Image (cartoon, rainbow, N blue to C red):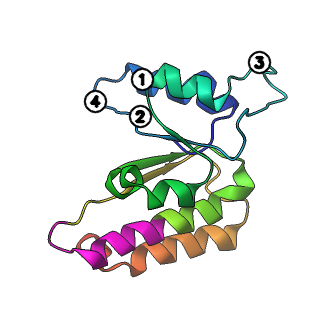
């Protein structure tokens, strides 16, 4: 889960945690104690890590460099809207790297991004273009 703010703490994390088919493998947030105008009582990353029994990371790059990041099969992007594009690019590049590194044993990386996908139409188009340029996307373009 990328972003540990109000939506993550109030909705995403509790629902993911209740789902027996989901493992919360990591929580990423740049702030050790996320804040929100909607809820001044958000929990710290340390508290969330204990509650959901997972490690915390302070950047997406830090997560992706770790063994957890290299093996995760999905990411839920719950950050401020203006950050969605950069995070999306980073995740698409990680999926592409995985595929190019070992096409036969490739582990897909699914991305669920909160709406809006970006705050700029051109950025949304660029994300779509990046997705369609991947070699593994060929099987979906037929």
Residue 16 percent coordinates (x, y): 43, 28
Residue 93 percent coordinates (x, y): 46, 72
Label 2 neighbourhood size at 10 Å, few (<14), some (14-19), many (20+)? some
- Marks 2 and 1 sit apart, C-alpha to C-alpha, by 7 Å
- Marks 4 and 2 sit apart, C-alpha to C-alpha, by 10 Å
Q: Residue at x 70, y 37 (%)?
A: 32
User: In the image, is residue 78 part of the stretch drawn in magenta?
Assistant: no
Label 1 neighbourhood size at 10 Å, few (<14), some (14-19), many (20+)? some
Callout count: 4
- Image quarter of the C terminus: bottom left
Residue placed most toward the observer, 69 or 87:
69
Where, by quadrant of the figure, is residue 2 drawn? top right
Position of 75 compared to 39: left or right? left
Q: Residue at x 38, y 67 (%)?
A: 95
Residue placed most toward the observer, 96 or 102:
102
From the image, state whether disc 4 or disc 2 is nearer to you. Answer: 2
Which residue position holds label 1?
17
Where, by quadrant of the figure, is residue 140 drawn? bottom left
- Marks 1 and 4 sit apart, C-alpha to C-alpha, by 9 Å
Q: Earlier in the sequence, mark 3 or mark 4?
A: 4
Are discs 3 and 2 less than 8 Å apart at CB? Answer: no
Q: What residue span does the magenta drawing correspond to?
A: 92-105
Which residue position holds label 4?
21
Q: Earlier in the sequence, mark 3 or mark 1?
A: 1
Q: Earlier in the sequence, mark 2 or mark 1?
A: 1
Are discs 2 and 1 less than 8 Å apart at CB? Answer: yes
Label 3 neighbourhood size at 10 Å, few (<14), some (14-19), many (20+)? few
Which residue position holds label 3?
41
* In the image, residue 109 above or below residue 5: below
Which residue position holds label 2?
24
Position of 59 compared to 23: left or right? right
């Amino acid at each position: 889960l990328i972003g540990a703010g109000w939506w993550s703490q109030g909705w995403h994390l509790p629902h993911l945690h209740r789902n027996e088919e989901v493992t919360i493998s990591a929580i990423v947030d740049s702030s050790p104690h996320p804040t929100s105008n909607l809820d001044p009582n958000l929990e710290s990353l340390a508290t969330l890590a204990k509650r959901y029994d997972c490690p915390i990371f302070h950047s997406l790059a830090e997560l992706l460099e770790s063994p957890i990041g290299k093996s995760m099969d999905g990411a839920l992007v719950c950050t401020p809207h203006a950050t969605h594009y950069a995070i999306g690019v980073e995740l698409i590049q990680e999926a592409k790297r995985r595929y190019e590194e070992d096409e036969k044993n490739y582990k897909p990386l699914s991305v669920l991004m909160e709406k809006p996908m970006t705050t700029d139409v051109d950025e949304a188009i660029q994300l779509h273009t990046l997705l369609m340029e991947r070699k593994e996307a060929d099987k979906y373009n037929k």
